[in-house]
Image: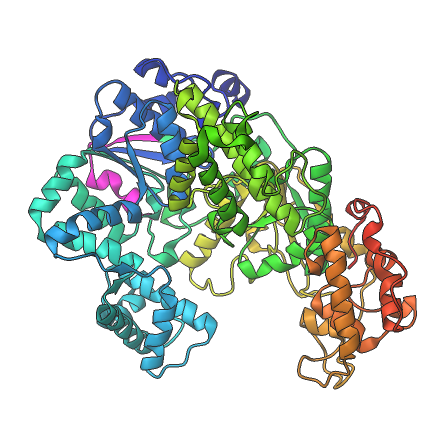
Amino acid sequence: MTSATHSSLFPQVPTAADHAVPPRDADAVLDGLDPEQREVATALHGPVCVLAGAGTGKTRAITHRIAYGVRAGILPPASVLAVTFTNRAAGEMRGRLRLLGAGGVQARTFHSAALRQLQYFWPKAVGGEVPRLVERKIQLVAEAAARCRIRLDRNELRDVTGEIEWSKVTQTVPEDYPAAAAKVARETPRDPAEITRIYGTYEQLKRDRGVIDFEDVLLLTVGILQDRPDIADQVRRQYQHFVVDEYQDVSPLQQRLLELWLGDRDNLCVVGDASQTIYSFTGATPDHLLDFRTRHPNATVVKLVRDYRSTPQVVHLANGLLAQARGRAAEHRLALVSQREAGPEPVYQEYPDEPAEAEGTARRIRELLDAGVPASEVAVLYRINAQSEVYEQALADQGVPYQLRGAERFFERPEVREAGVALRGAARAGANDTMLDAAEDLPSQVRAVLGTKGWTAEPPAGSGAVRDRWESLAALVRLAEQFAASRAAAGDGTGAGLAEFVAELDERAAAQHAPTVEGVTLASLHAAKGLEWDAVFLVGLTEGMMPITYAKTDEQVEEERRLLYVGVTRARVHLTLSWALSRAPGGRASRRASRFLTGLRPGSGARGAAAGGAGGIERGSGSRRKRRGPVQCRVCGRTLTDAGEMKLMRCEGCPSDLDEALYERLREWRMEQAKELGQPAYCVFTDKTLMAIAEAVPATESELAGISGVGRRKLDRFGADVLALCAGEEPPGKAADEPSDEAADEPSEG
């Protein structure tokens, strides 16, 4: 059967919000499921293993399975525990279950479920209050290292903390760490004996202060369930049916907790994809998924391979990428079959340097936005977080709003906190609040309240702090609209008032289940797991970055391939893969594209035409630039490679002839410009560019243009002001008074 036929029989997988009316009975829950999803939904007894490829509707299948069991009277809601790995995924699952009529089911992360049990049973099992939970262990690790007289830099501190976390989830005690690390060929950031000492001291510090960390939550829950059969029996009487999502990411410690929850029963449904195992550095292993049928010979096994997310072109590339894979996970790969209409071919782009790559990516994103693609449906994905800065600058130069995934949490933003206080106050005032007199429903009430905090029906211009604040408030407005619609669909429209909405916000804040914010997403490939966008830009795909330099063993390299596969399968329609030949402008073009693209992109190998499709390789527009020679320090003559030093034309440590008074005047002027533009200050000029101007003190337009960071557009826009300041004069006029959207149509040269 062709994918077109599939597509007509089984619609694109919807979210819970797509259910205008809740299913009328158990059989109606099965409507719209494809044959394999229906098989999952109706397999309610005994062990079930669902091998689900990317975009195949696994969450839909397992939530409908739970809802069908509940609506059919087979699964009592309170007896079901659905476990996943992120608060966002757990929140999404709870929302879907509620709309399917199974709102009483518990959907939690492993840590959340274990913490609840620990808090409940601690007084009975141990006595007293549960020790305080330390959310950030890195400070304690730093103190432990200091007590051991071991000096760690910031990166080593982070890596040693990771080693301690890995040890705990693999149930490795400090004295066994060296042997355990050697057994799995783990590349340790410091001598294993030193890590053993730090790990042991860290554990002692926690005991002395009566605190626990996140891994302790699992360890202590496991300990109580192992040592107290009466408590284990109580938990098993409560929970009799288990569903585990993302089972390929289960650690040995989580698997042990799951076994203790289960006891001698087999009412377990697991869902996973070995080809998406990307967290082995944290202790995750696909072995539990791959060995499931060995442990449960009578298990029902269902494969989901119909991909409802991505176009055939994207799926073809994803399949081609895995076809080159090796190892145990590769032997169990799923060949996806797209159910969508054909789309554009993936684009491969090569650039001369990283700034050119960022600018080219930003220009293409601006084109997509101008063509009607929402900013929230575009993502730039990279291997490590340090790659984000150049893309932040490039997007800001194009006037494109963006959000950093993994940065400040949504519910911790000042404007969201203020909005919560205002909504809570309005909910308490109720009918006495005159501000709500004209508001007929929940969304209009929320708009009225947030209108006092800066929300408007139309977004402000620009992409700076003002726009960021508006986007946060707009996300709350959309959430109110979705909340009211879901309550109405569930037949509970009367329960969609401000008080109920505030309670929903509190629940989401506790679970860190944030709403969608409008803006292009910048995220690492690891942080992108479980998400999807209409357009995805995979950037920085060079040897040494993908695979990363420290991926030495075949197994580590294969995990890097799987990481790229995860990135590819985040795209629904548009997919661009790019790389740069050098780090900085004028640098030696010594880099080469990732080995994972060999045989996929045209002209890169014998399999290029067959596996790569027709997607063409393009030279980024930046490659037409005139190449500059090596940039040398104007003080000592050393060849510069750091972007910041190249901007200053000198080494960081070389003497500076900075005109400090001019530098301060430039900073004050920049602050005024940024405020009027509603953009971050660095969108006008970065600190390094201002410093370079204050050192060079240019007298002419050509001298100003010769400073790195002053491109044609910024020269036209700000040049007269800057030259006047350099001459000790007042700026002739405010550049912010000029039309701000002109810049959006021009390529950034700054």
Is 3 above or below relative to 301? above
Q: Is residue 187 visible?
A: no
Identified at 37% across, 31% down, the residue is 303
* Callout count: 0
Identified at 91% across, 72% down, the residue is 699
Q: Is residue 417 visible?
A: yes
What is the x, y in percent for residue 613? 62, 37
Is 703 above or below relative to 610? below
Q: Quadrant of the C terminus?
A: bottom right
Query: Which one is in front, 695 or 441?
Result: 441
Query: Which one is in front, 190 or 273?
Result: 190
User: 365 left or right of 524?
Assistant: right
Magenta stretch holds residue 641? no
What is the x, y in percent for residue 250? 31, 48
Identified at 51% across, 64% down, the residue is 549
User: 491 left or right of 292?
Assistant: right
Specify the color scheme: rainbow
What is the x, y in percent for residue 406? 49, 53
Specify the farthest residue to the left. Answer: 230
User: 653 left or right of 16?
Assistant: right
What is the x, y in percent for residue 267? 20, 33
Q: Quadrant of residue 333?
A: top left
Is 247 above or below relative to 623? above
Q: Quadrant of residue 689?
A: bottom right
Point out the stretch of residues depicted in magenta.
Answer: 286-302
Magenta stretch holds residue 296? yes
